[in-house]
Amino acid sequence: MKKDRIKIATIGGGSSYTPELIEGYIKRKDELPIGEIWLVDIEEGKEKLEIVGNLARRMVQKAGLDWEIHLTLDRREALKDADFVSTQFRVGLLDARIKDERIPLSHGVLGQETNGAGGMFKAFRTIPVILDIVKDMKELCPNAWLVNFTNPAGMVTEAVLKYGNFERVVGLCNVPIGHNMRESQLLGKTVEELQFQYAGLNHHHWHKIHDKDGNDLTEKVMDAIYENQDNIMENIKFIPFFEEQLRDLGMLPCGYHQYYYLTDDMVKKELEEFATNSTRAETVKKLEAELFEIYKNPELGEKPEQLSKRGGAYYSDAACELIASIHNDKRTDMVVSTRNNGALSDLPYDCAVEVSSIITATGPKPINFGKFPAAQRGLVQLMKAMEEVTIEAAVTGNYGKALQAFTINPLVPSGKIAKTILDEMLVAHKDHLPQFKEAIDKIE
Ligand code: G6P
C-alpha cells in the first residue's frame, strides 16, 4: 500500500552527487511525500558525509520542507523499512578508479571507468558489495525499490537480478537524457515534442528519433551533427564518428561507442592524459576536492553550478523522476537498465538491457525493440557475453573466468598482455577483491 510519508536511503550518501539528488527531490516535492532521507556512508567517507549532509539539510530548509535528513554509517539502520534505496557508491574510492585507468594505459591499452579492463575491475569490486546490500534489503525492506546508479550500472543491475534474485531493481544512467536534450536542440524542438527509442546495453546503446506524427528524424539529426560540428553530443565533439559508418548504422550511437568505433584515437587521447597525470579519474579527484570546499560554505543552500563539471549532470532528473514515476504509477517513458524480457530479441531473455521503458508502479516495462541490423547485433551480443562472464567472475572469484572476460572484451588484447594486465590489477586492487584471494596469493 502507498505510504503517506516515504523513506529514502542513499548508499554512498557522502558522494559529491548528493546535492543533485536533493535538488531533484525538492523539484518534485508535490508528487513525492518524503518523510525521511537517510544518507549512508562508510568510515572513510565520514567527513564527506558530514559536509554534504549539512548542505542537504540547508537545501531542504531553504525550500521550506520538513524532511528529516539522517546521516549514518549504519547501513542496516538506514535500510530498515525504506521505500526506495538508491546506490551511488564507489568501492575503493577514486584511488581505485585511478588504478583502473592507469594500469591498462601503462601497457598501451585503454583504461576507462566502465569500459575495457577498468570497467571489468569496477564490476569485480562492486558486485559482491551490491549483493550484500541486496541481502540486507531482503531482510529489512523487501518491498523497497533499488535504484542503482553505481557503475558499471548495467552489470550491477544484472547481478542483482540474477545472483541477488531481487526483482525490484532499476539501473540508471544519465547519458540518454544528455542525448535527448542536445538532439532536440539540434532539431529546434523540445524533448517532449519528440519520441526517442533506445536499445542496447548501459554505455552501449543506439537510438532513433521520431516526431509525434511518427516521422523518423534520425537522419535529420545526423545532418545537423555533420553540419554543425560544435553542437553535438559532448563526446562526439572532439572525435567525430566516420560519417559513412554512422549513416550506415541508421541509428545514433552513444558517446561511449567512441571507444569501439574509434579505438585508436581514443587510446591515443587517453595516453596523452596518462602522460600528463590528467586521466579522468585524476581530474575528477581534483574537482571533487574543490566541490567539497564549496559545499562547506554555511551560506550555501543550493546545488552549486560547479557540480555540472562532473559527467553525471541530470542524474537527479533520472533518479528522482524514476522514483516519482514508480511511486505515482506515472507511466513515464524513460531509459533504464532492466530485465530484457524479450524486448531486444537478439539478447538473452533474462539479461539486463538498457532500453526505453514505461515506468509503472510495478517497475519498468521495456518497449519492444525487436532485432538489430547485423552490425549492431554482432557487437552487442559480444558485449553482453563479456558482461555475463565478468559478472560470473565477480561472483565466483574464478581466475579463468576473469581471463575469459578479458579475452572477449574488444578493448583488451588477448594473450600474454591480457594476463599481465589482469595479474597486475588483481594485486593492485587486492584489498577490495576478497573473492579472488586464492588467485592473488598465487600471483604474489
Ligand atoms: C556519465 C556516465 C556515468 C559516469 C559519469 C562520469 O554520466 O553515464 O556513468 O559516472 O559520466 O562522470 P565523471 O565526472 O566521474 O567522469
Image: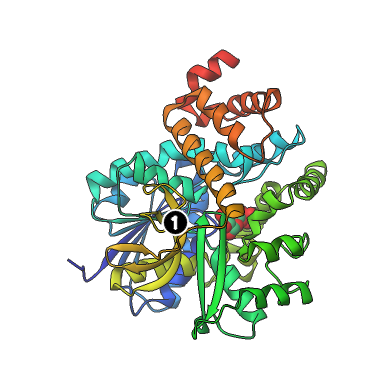
Quadrant showing the C terminus = top right
Residue at 62% x, 27% y: name it: 422
Measured as percent of width and height from the top left, residue 87 is found at 43, 52
Left or right of 263 in this view: 391:
left
The residue under label 1 is which amino acid type? Leu
Left or right of 240 in this view: 307:
left
Give whichever of 381, 365 is nearer the camera: 381
Q: Quadrant of residue 237?
A: bottom right
Left or right of 67 in this view: 119:
right
Give whichever of 258, 105 is nearer the camera: 258
Categorize mark 1 by other alpha carbons within 10 Å: few (<14), some (14-19), many (20+): many
Please indicate, yes or no, whether residue 41 appears anywhere in the rendered image. no
The residue labelled by disc 1 is 344
Q: Is disc 1 placed on a helix, strand or loop?
A: loop
Give whichever of 354, 305 is nearer the camera: 354
Q: Quadrant of residue 345?
A: bottom left
Measured as percent of width and height from the top left, residue 218 is found at 61, 74
Residue at 63% x, 75% y: name it: 183
Give whichever of 207, 358 is nearer the camera: 207
**Outermost front residue:** 374
Q: Image height check: is 321 above or below 8?
A: below
Measured as percent of width and height from the top left, residue 194 is found at 52, 80
Ligand 1 quarter of the rendering: bottom right
Residue at 21% x, 68% y: name it: 3
Please indicate, yes or no, whether residue 387 appears anywhere in the rendered image. yes
Left or right of 161 in this view: 138:
left
Quadrant showing the N terminus = bottom left
Q: How is the image coloured?
A: rainbow
Measured as percent of width and height from the top left, residue 372 is found at 53, 57
